[in-house]
Image (tube, helix red, strand yellow):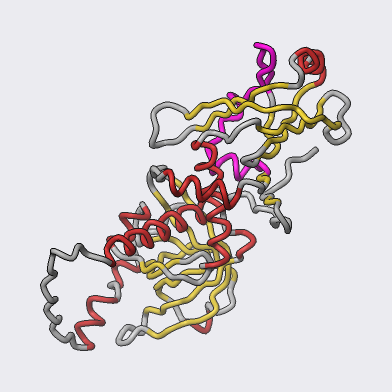
Amino acid sequence: MGILTSQKINDYYLRFKTIDVTFSRELIQVTGLNTNQVYLKCGGDFWPCVIFSSSFQGAKLVVSLKSGILQKLEKANNMVSVRYCFKYAEKGNPVTFFVNAKSSGYAPYGTSTDMALFSLQFTQRPPDDLIEIMGRILDARLNSAKRRDERIAVTPDSIRKLNIVSKESAIFIQGVPRHCILRDISFSGAKLIMMGVAKFLMEKDAALRIDFDDPRQSFLLKGKFIRSEAVEGRKELVALVMNFDEAAVPMGYKVRLNDYLSQSRLDNRVGADPPPDKKTAPEKAAAPQSNAAAAKTDWPSVDEIAPPAPPPAPAEAPEPAEASGGEHFELELPSR
């Protein structure tokens, strides 16, 4: 997770402060929430708890009633604090902080008589760490719909900034692994090159695997091929456009792409207005390139397309549930 400016964090807070985010298993994995280190503190004592959902204004926690929490709340005038703990690969130590809150009541959790769902209202703005962590998720969810078709060309520069392991990847067509080369990716689909005959591949169920580093993650993106393009002078190759099943696109993939697009937009703004005292030299026009040369540099060789068998597919990420309308965002409700 990159370092955000205070202006960006304030923007997250103003845009998303009322949206309640349910901590599903997928969201716990994406945010790095350490569930074993989350506690409710009241009157100097700590109670293990489960964060059911959270916003920038409050949270809902699942706590055992047998622990004596009700008596402590009464003595403390319902004043508590919540201990959050997140872990990141790029940071040696976990990110831990407390948020002061007041309990506004509780209700039975599902059919359980021992567990209760407590509603808490924060008494102050939460730390920037929580705003940044949850803001990135909500911003990625929003932009994955607004910028769903914005393509990112897979180049050495974008591979480095996105931390993609390699442009070479694997595509599973009706469960059979095939090697492919990534050409571009987006929130809603991808373009790739592989060996094959287009008419036998169109409308087939497929799953594209993309591997990332820092931290190491593999995402399996399900969808179908919707369009094919011939590769000039290379009859053994075909360029295929794939549409993802958007309901099954992992949130971690959305966050990766959104971080890249947001940083690219910021870089473009910074580079758009050079200082007035510096004159940039006019760029020399590139020499025209023949079609044959362009084809030679643009398309991979047969050896690139047909290496040894690709590694096995990783376990599929859990499919997120549909987000509810209004001001509430759910990926997957925990079972009650």
Figure quadrant of the N terminus = top left
Which residue is pictured at 37% across the width and 55% down the height? 162
Q: Position of residue 25 (x, y in %)?
A: 64, 41
Whether 293 is among the magenta residues is no
Figure quadrant of the C terminus = top right
Q: Position of residue 61 (x, y in %)?
A: 72, 31
Whether 31 is among the magenta residues is yes
Observer-nearest residue: 45 or 127? 127
- Apparent side of residue 305 relative to residue 59 in the rendered image (left or right): left
Q: Please indicate, yes or no, whether residue 292 appears anywhere in the rendered image.
A: yes
Observer-nearest residue: 281 or 110? 281
Q: Please indicate, yes or no, whether residue 314 appears anywhere in the rendered image.
A: no
- Apparent side of residue 300 relative to residue 252 in the rendered image (left or right): left
Q: Position of residue 75 (x, y in %)?
A: 78, 12
Which residue is pictured at 37% across the width and 80% down the height? 236
In the image, which residues are magenta? 22-48
283 w.r.t. 212: above or below: below
56 w.r.t. 120: above or below: below
Which residue is pictured at 64% across the width and 61% down the height? 247
